[in-house]
């Protein structure tokens, strides 16, 4: 299968996609870092299940019992939802300290931020995101433009809430933004917000490529190397 057949744009096409965008919206866990590399999400989910059991609630029937985000969404509106969200946020903040940077992501952020607005649109805790960005000297590029999970878990992606908040705050029309995300919920949220979407997969993620295309992504980039090659010495206008 050729790159074009797989939905993977060549460098010139990728540069064109990036050039059209006035604002790039980054998903966090994946395109920027591996948040749970050294502090597994499953451990957070276990603590959340334990809290449910202690509260007399059975966690049986969860589609993915080791997925804390899925668990939070499942129990949205429950009387223990706020406590579950607190446990998840606490775990994410701890994980942020030891998160593993996505190879090439920091260079890509710096290059893009030279001529484009950038923001984070994520299901993760905005406090955890800020903690990670500041630890890597990336906070200066994003400032307060981090649009993460709120107290209402029903607004997590694939709901477009975080993207709609970002588009409104950045003052850029949705069609002039670009979201870089690595999951089907990212692709769906972008589509619902009217934001063009560029899928991202790790260098060994051919299965992820197929899943992203199935989710509606027209283009999927594999690894950061093509993105770095596409931005080259910078994208030039439109940032003023």
Image (cartoon, rainbow, N blue to C red):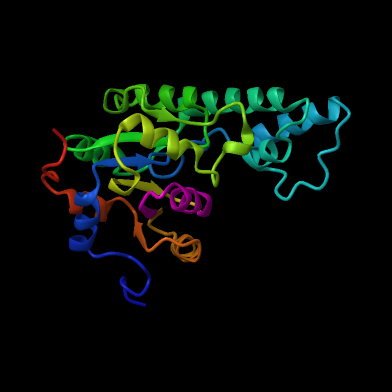
**Main secondary structure found in the magenta portion:** helix
The quarter of the displayed image where residue 114 is located:
top left
**Residue 101 percent location from the top left of the image:** 38, 37
Q: Relative to residue 132, is residue 72 drawn left or right?
A: right
- Magenta includes 139? no
Residue 187 position (above or below residue 88): below
Please state, as top left, top right, bottom left or bottom right, where the N terminus lies in the image: bottom left
User: Depth check: 152 or 219 in front?
Assistant: 152
Q: Relative to residue 127, is residue 231 drawn left or right?
A: left
**Residue 144 percent location from the top left of the image:** 36, 22
- What segment carries the magenta color? 184-199
Residue at 66% in and 42% down: 70
Q: Is residue 121 among what the camera can see?
A: yes
Q: Relative to residue 90, is residue 138 drawn left or right?
A: left
User: Depth check: 37 or 115 in front?
Assistant: 115
Residue at 78% in and 25% down: 79
Please state, as top left, top right, bottom left or bottom right, where the C terminus lies in the image: top left
**Residue 139 percent location from the top left of the image:** 32, 24
Residue 240 position (above or below residue 18): above
- Magenta includes 190? yes
Residue at 35% in and 52% down: 196
User: Depth check: 69 or 218 in front?
Assistant: 218
């Amino acid at each position: 299968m050729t790159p074009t057949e797989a939905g993977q744009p060549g460098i010139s096409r990728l540069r064109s996609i990036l050039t059209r965008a006035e604002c790039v919206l980054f998903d966090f866990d994946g395109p920027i870092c591996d948040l749970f590399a050294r502090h597994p999400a499953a451990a957070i989910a276990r603590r959340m299940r334990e809290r449910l059991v202690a509260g007399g609630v059975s966690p049986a029937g969860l589609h993915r019992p080791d997925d804390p985000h899925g668990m939070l969404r499942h129990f949205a509106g429950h009387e223990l939802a706020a406590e579950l969200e607190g446990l998840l946020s606490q775990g994410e903040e701890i994980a942020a300290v030891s998160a593993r940077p996505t190879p090439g992501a920091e260079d890509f952020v710096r290059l893009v931020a030279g001529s484009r607005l950038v923001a984070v649109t994520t299901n993760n805790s905005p406090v955890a995101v800020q903690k990670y960005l500041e630890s890597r000297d990336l906070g200066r590029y994003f400032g307060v433009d981090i649009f993460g999970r709120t107290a209402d878990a029903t607004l997590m992606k694939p709901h477009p809430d975080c993207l709609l908040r970002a588009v409104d705050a950045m003052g850029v029309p949705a069609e002039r933004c670009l979201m870089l995300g690595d999951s089907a919920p990212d692709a769906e949220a972008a589509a619902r917000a009217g934001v063009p979407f560029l899928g991202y997969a790790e260098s060994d993620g051919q299965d992820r490529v197929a899943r992203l295309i199935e989710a509606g992504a027209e283009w999927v980039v594999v690894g950061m190397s093509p993105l770095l090659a596409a931005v080259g010495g910078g994208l030039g206008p439109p940032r003023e």
